[in-house]
Amino acid sequence: MASVDTAWESLKGRLTELEALGGVVQLLEWDQQTMMPKGGGSQRGAQLSTLTGIMHDRLADPQVGSWLAALCDETDPIKAASVRNVQRDHERATRVPTRLVAEIASASNSGFSAWLAAREANDFSLFQSSVERLVELRKEEIACHGPADHPYDHLLDQYDPGSTTAQLQPMFARLKEELAAFIASVSGKEGPATVTGRWDIAGQEALSKSVIDALGFRLDDGRLDPAEHPFTVGMGTGDVRLTTHLYEDDLLGGLTGTIHEAGHGMYEQGLPSVHTGTGVATAAGMGLHESQSRFWENVVGRSLPFFQWLAPMIRDQWPDTNISAEQWFGHANRVERSLIRVQADEATYNLHIVIRFELELKLLTGEIQVADLPDAWNDAYANLLGIRPSTPNEGVLQDVHWSNGLFGYFPSYTIGNLYAASFRYQMEEDVPDLWNRIAQGDFTPALQWLREKVHVHGHIQDAPEIFLAAVGDRDPVADLMAHLRSRQGALYGE
Ligand SMILES: [Zn+2]
């Protein structure tokens, strides 16, 4: 067996290589969605699958296993964290046979095409067998990992290491009950008015850049480009790329999306680059990543102090509009029972996630079959949101996730919202003049708090531990409800 020092140097060498390859994959994906001509599709597919194949082999390499074995008693916190993270990835890469990995990749590919066709025809039956196949393959994959408290834990672990079904289930159940009651109490009441108008795209691009620059996204270490579906990639702290989609008739729709991505981007820019090559200079999980985007988009970006700073900037850009901070604030915090998750407001949004989480659990345990999904979906919407989808496109066919075999991903969105709400209240305690500073356009104290409590920790601990160290024993469900009452509740006279 290799000596401990040699094992560490060898492991670092391999991780440095894997991080570089991962960066290239990200860059190719960014290019695919921003710059690549349509004709590049099949070449790009071959490039990506070649690279991910190489990465898989380099990670599954038995040598990695022997280095990890030599380092199993490591006590240095960075090295120990590195070993824990790589161990997880190495096990995932070795336990699942290459045949199954390839079958999942190909089923996801054809699942996506079937989903597009089903959406085109507004007909779930065209998608059903693809989902059945993907659920079966995922179950097979879960079986490779051996026993767990709940089979869903293996799925959660891929996106949110450290989160468990046993911990999420009661939290989501409580949230569901409290949210449903809150939404019932505000809906039906006359809420704030919608703001309408037209804002030219060039003006919006200029405004978006000024806003993210003020928030603290370093434009020298990043970019902002248009894309059909906004996303962010980070190739190290010095090259973080945001994308956004702007709409001429919906200024806030585009801007909140940009701020969301900038939240992801500032997390990537704040990761501990001193630990590059150890596997810990990375995000601790998708839920924590989402807490950063939601914090800036919702906690900051839908607050009255934020609009007190922003409204004059909008007037400067479009001198013939005159919309007050209060009008923007009202518009940004309207509550509506709606069928489509990505268009949902901040209050109803989490019910859309709870519905998906519960359906995924039932699918996985066999409590419902894929054929039952459309009805189960519609019943859940009728029960929880009081509205029933009238077509599959408004219901079970609306999200791309399942077509790609992404089960276990949806909870990240709500974990993000829960974390973000607790970050808000802890930050208010730690930074008493937080909101005054934000009203002046000074976002430094907020960003510094997140840097210190979240970003610099990379993936040294798992997200639940980072959260606990940041906010202590705060109750995230209570915090999210308090946050919503302080905004929508107040605007709707609750
Ligand atoms: Zn996001």
Image (cartoon, rainbow, N blue to C red):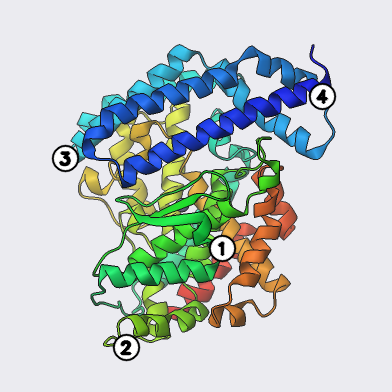
Of residue 289 and residue 424, the one placed in the foreground of this image is 289
Q: Is residue 215 above or below residue 67?
A: below
Ligand 1 under 8 Å from disc 3 Cβ: no
Instruction: Indicate the position of residue 9 as horizontal and vertical percent values.
Output: 74, 26
Q: Mark 4 falls on what kind of element?
A: helix
Q: Mark 1 falls on what kind of element?
A: helix
Q: Which residue is mark 3?
A: 120
Q: Left or right of 410: which side holds 314?
A: left
Label 1 amino acid? Leu
Q: Which residue is mark 1?
A: 480
Q: In this rendering, which labeled residue sits more in front, label 2 or label 1?
A: 2
Q: Left or right of 16: which side holds 3?
A: right
**Disc 3: CA contacts within 10 A as few (<14), some (14-19) or many (>=20):** few
Label 2 amino acid? Asn
Question: What is the spatial separation of the Cα atoms under label 3 and label 2, in whole angstroms?
Answer: 41 Å
The residue that appears at 66% across and 80% down in the rendered structure is 433
Label 3 amino acid? Glu
Q: Quadrant of the N terminus?
A: top right
Question: What is the spatial separation of the Cα atoms under label 4 and label 3, in whole angstroms?
Answer: 58 Å
